[in-house]
Amino acid sequence: MLFLKILILAVIQGITELLPVSSSAHVIVAEKLMGLDPTSPQMTLLLAMLHTGTMFAVIVFFWSSWKKSFFSSKKVFQESLKFILVATILTGCVGVGLKILIEKFLLKETPHAEIEMIFGNLAFISAALALVGILILWAGKGSKFPGMKNSLGLKASCMIGAVQGICLAFRGFSRSGATISTGLLLGIDKKIVENFSFALAVVLTPPVIVREVLRLFKAQHVHALHHIDMLSLLTPSLIGMVLSFISGILALRWLSSWLESGRWYLFGIYCLGASVVVFLLHCRGL
């Protein structure tokens, strides 16, 4: 893998990971355009490092806000922790459930089926982008679900966590776009749901990274990699992590500004446009 390609992917990952436009869709399309395999173990290692960079960007950017919202008192911290854990558990249940269903039914004819095998399918990505675009537009119009208390409670946390679980299974269904939009539809204050969504991302990222790294070492041909090959992969990945951290900080400033200014719907329009582009690329055999 050329070093320049890794730098390009790092910048794309950093910019799009924290915006509600699906970093996975953008990175996968970029990989395919550059002739890379988005499901390969080598790419898993690189993406793990890039996700680490954006995770640190989230922590740095939201830390002062989290101190006021999540750490203002012992009672608030315990309640916030309960909501985050409940949402994360629901994410795991939905994500694992979808993984089993996809591998057992959608990929039942494929030997050693893994859900990652569909991650590079541009038709699925196009459909997921379109769906999240519609969800963002719906939330951007100020619509709300009936019968909700318009606050972040146990029921709302479960719903947001379940939606996040769907995002794990389908590349293109933006995690931040889907979770923040769900919170807005529940009537939760924009700043509160933004903080909660990215707090969930920090909790979710480490186990996802561990899974990706383990997948690299469990791959059948990983034993053929020499020590020097691993070092050559790790060094540019670390640089990519730094770049994704920097670009992630910049992206978060943009996202927060657009969310607070009432322009959330524009991300939905972007996702719908991106869906069309990805579908056209799929039709051309990319």
Image (cartoon, rainbow, N blue to C red):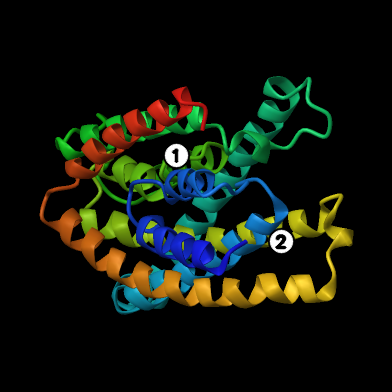
Q: Quadrant of the N terminus?
A: bottom right
- The three-letter code of the residue at mark 2 reads Val
Name of the residue lying farthest toward the left = 261
Q: Is residue 87 left or right of residue 207?
A: left
35 to 112, vertically: above or below: below
- The three-letter code of the residue at mark 1 reads Gly
Residue 66 in sight here: no
Label for residue 172? 1
Depth check: give the residue in front, 200 or 285.
285
Point 83% across, 75% down: residue: 227
Depth check: give the residue in front, 87 or 35.
35
Q: Is residue 162 left or right of residue 214?
A: left
Point 44% across, 62% down: residue: 8
106 to 261, vertically: above or below: above
Numbered marks: total = 2
Depth check: give the residue in front, 266 or 5.
5
Label for residue 244? none
Secondary structure, mark 1, is: loop
Secondary structure, mark 2, is: helix
Q: CA distance from mark 1 to mark 2?
A: 21 Å
The answer to which image quadrant residue 107 occupies is: top right
Q: Please provide percent x and percent y for residue 37.
A: 63, 46
Point 40% across, 46% down: residue: 22
Residue 8 in sight here: yes
Q: Is residue 255 left or right of residue 109?
A: left
Q: Please provide percent x and percent y for residue 115.
A: 67, 37
Q: Which residue is mark 2?
A: 213
For marks 1 and 2 on the same chain, the one whose residue lies earlier in the sequence: 1
Q: Please provide percent x and percent y for residue 113.
A: 77, 33
Asked if the residue under mark 2 is in contact with the one under mark 1, i.e. CB atoms within 8 Å, the reply is no
